[in-house]
Image (cartoon, rainbow, N blue to C red):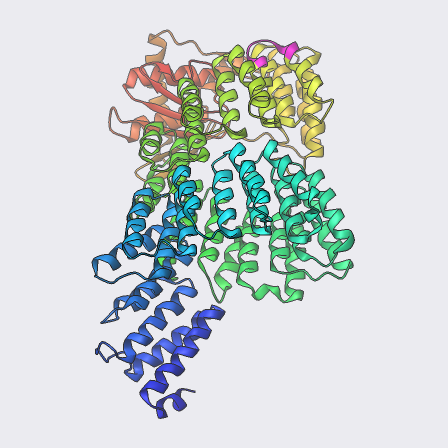
Amino acid sequence: MRAAISRSGVDDACRSYARLLKECGRLGDLAHGKRLHAQIRESGLLLDDREESGARFLGNCLVQMYGKCGRTDEAQRAFDSIAHKNIFSWTSILVAYFHAGLHAQALERFHQMIKAGVEPDRLVFLAALNVCGILKRLEDGAGIHRQIQDKLLDSDLEIGNALVSMYGKCGRLDLAKQLFDCLEMKNVISWTILVSVFAENGRRRETWGLLRSMAVEGIKPDKVLLLTLLNVCSSRGVLDEDSWMAHDYIVGSGLDREAVVATALLSMFARCGRVDKAREIFEKVADHSAQVIECWNAMITAYAHRGCSKEALFLLDSLQLQGVKPNCITFISSLGACSSLQDGRALHLLIDESGFDREVSVANALVTMYGRCGSLLDSAKLFSEMAEKDLASWNSAIAAHAYHGRSDECIKLLDQMRGEGGLEPSSVTLVTAMSACGGLADPSSSKRVHERARELGLESETCVANGLVDMYGKAGDVDTARYIFDRALRRNVTTWNAMAGAYRQCGVTRGVLWLVRTMQRDGYRPDSVTFVSLLSVCGHSGLLEEARYNFVAMRREFGIDPSPKHYSCVIDLLARAGELQQAEDFIARISVSSPASSPMWMALLGACRSLGDSSSRARRAARNAMDVEKMEPRSQHDPSAAHVALANICAASGNWDEALSIRKAMAEKGLRKEPGRSLIAVKNRLHEFVAGDRDHPRREEIYAELRRLERAMVDRGYVVDTGMVTHNVGEADKRDLLGCHSEKLAVAFGVLSTPPGSSLRIIKNLRACGDCHTAIKLISAIEGREIVVRDSNRFHHFRNGSCSCGDYW
């Protein structure tokens, strides 16, 4: 082919290369596209700097090819090399960024185009309006509207529809409706856009009023509109009045038997937690349209998202038995359902046999699956062996490491994707990496990811801002989280929830209460996640009546059905308030409709331990928690926790024989108490300590420092609380055991290794014991330091002899 092109004329060569580049873009064949680019460079066709030369034509084709292959960096380089850029050059680079989801960069190219004196055409205006709507850039959108009016393009129906959409997505429904009314010739697309933006903005009455107006005008809603309505309902995660109205409307019109609409309806119920209703719709469609793979995929996805691994994989088997051929989505959804390495490897074998292992999207899902199922080695090996890696491939590899909190590997991959892969991280990439950085003893990883977001100009994107708030909140840096929250240009419910979660982690009760009031005042509707934070802070602050009011309001005013997390918060609150009988009665009431979860019983059991209640109630709670654990194989809770808590309760009450019996039963079942570990970062290096640790190279200095601190604490009235020890040993041994708990060792090492007055950050994997809590309060006053400890419950900010938790944790 290359020889044939060389023999032909320059114009023919340009056209031939253009056709081949277009085909590479259509197929996403980056490797062949790069080879063609190299041939074109060698041919000298790009060296002609005349304005109407073939160089500009080929340059535009290269920009389009790289854009369609998702390589915006290469597309930008090809664009920059064009000597005389025209409207097609600018359109190609703008569309490349738009299709890559880099909307802020696409809008920036539009403004650069205007400054360069190139007049946008109709296609560019449509793309720019779409970007403004997505980014909610009202000011930019209004400016583009004025340019459109100057060029007399506002009478164009497609432009008019795009303007209605832009203003609606930016929250200016009044202007959207005004422009809609001015459209001379409205079509079903016009109506669909207007109804959609009203629905997306939660304007229920107007949405259904517009649907009635459509009927009066004789315009029947198309599938696109119905799918949009269902998607809006799905995004709320709650089956509210709108959801049921949409359902009734679709069923009444008979469209629920159409595969596309039925699939969307099925997905809505699944996302809102009604898998039973989703299965009912699936069965109805499958009865007369068993070959519709989309319905099978949606049902498998529904089971996967609810953690119903067996049901999802059984459905995959049933699909094949009925002669339905799985596709990429089928395998991707099924991989998401795998709860064990055994299931994952069996499915991997089936994928290999089906020939789908060569599909990049399926390989990406395999990388994620192995990481989630505990085999980072398999995940990394599969990723390294991939012949072609796209942005999603790197995201999958980062997600696998993030799942295990491997922030160091996430940072390395971020660097590698730029150097080795030639790709810049997307907002999704950064948010995934952020999830690994929150809650680390060393905050440097968080700062590096934040700096990368700032470099790429993604800091202001809503999802990135949300990720930053969440990351700093999990790191206990509530001030930085609040700073980013206040600067967020476009908030959504997730933004508010992230900030509420940050306040909750740090025990800032007033902050959560203020946020919930303010978000409603600003027009945001609290969701299920909001109420988890609200009920949780009430529980940790003893606000019993406030919690009761909000628990009732959650269902009555907001239509949110309580989840096990909400129930656990209420039970924890009652138990902490000493209302153990009320807490147990509450569990009994909710167990009538659905089984109580392990965290519910553990909340009651934990309160029995704290309050010294060694009655039969503690044994009932422990037994029920153990029974539930057997029925919840995917539970992330420690299966030994109930045994340990009950053994500790027996030991605290002096019932050593029963405590020993429980510990023997644990050993027979192969259960081991998770040892307490504390992490502290000093000079960018993590140091881990366990109770009685003698392995650290500075152990002699650490224990000497502990003895010095203990003498200073005793001078301030400190008395060791030996009641914390659950082993049948003498008082002296109990004091020795308490004196070398992992968090005390970490604090002593931190005091030794950092400048006086500097703050210390420690991560503890278990709940901090009462004696250590008292000791660290005193040390913070003695040393004049802030000591931040994150245990399994929350953050503790120790300053001047007191703790942010108010001794209530």
362 or 669, nearer to the observer: 362
Asked if residue 170 can be seen in this view, the reply is yes
603 or 156, nearer to the observer: 156
Q: Judge whether residue 575 is colored magenta.
A: yes
- Whether residue 49 sits left or right of residue 362 in the image: it is left
- Whether residue 104 sits left or right of residue 679 in the image: it is left
364 or 445, nearer to the observer: 364
Total marks shown come to: 0
Q: Quadrant of the N terminus?
A: bottom left
Q: Position of residue 640 (x, y in %)?
A: 63, 29
Q: Position of residue 584 (x, y in %)?
A: 67, 15
191 or 327, nearer to the observer: 191
Rendered view: 203 above or below 23? above
Quadrant location of residue 619?
top right
Q: Position of residue 407 (x, y in %)?
A: 41, 44
Residue occupying image coordinates x 70% and y 18%: 589
Magenta span = 574-582
Asked if residue 727 can be seen in this view, the reply is no
Rendered view: 212 above or below 412? above
Dominant SS of magenta comes to helix
- Whether residue 13 sits left or right of residue 347 in the image: it is left
Q: Position of residue 769 (x, y in %)?
A: 49, 19
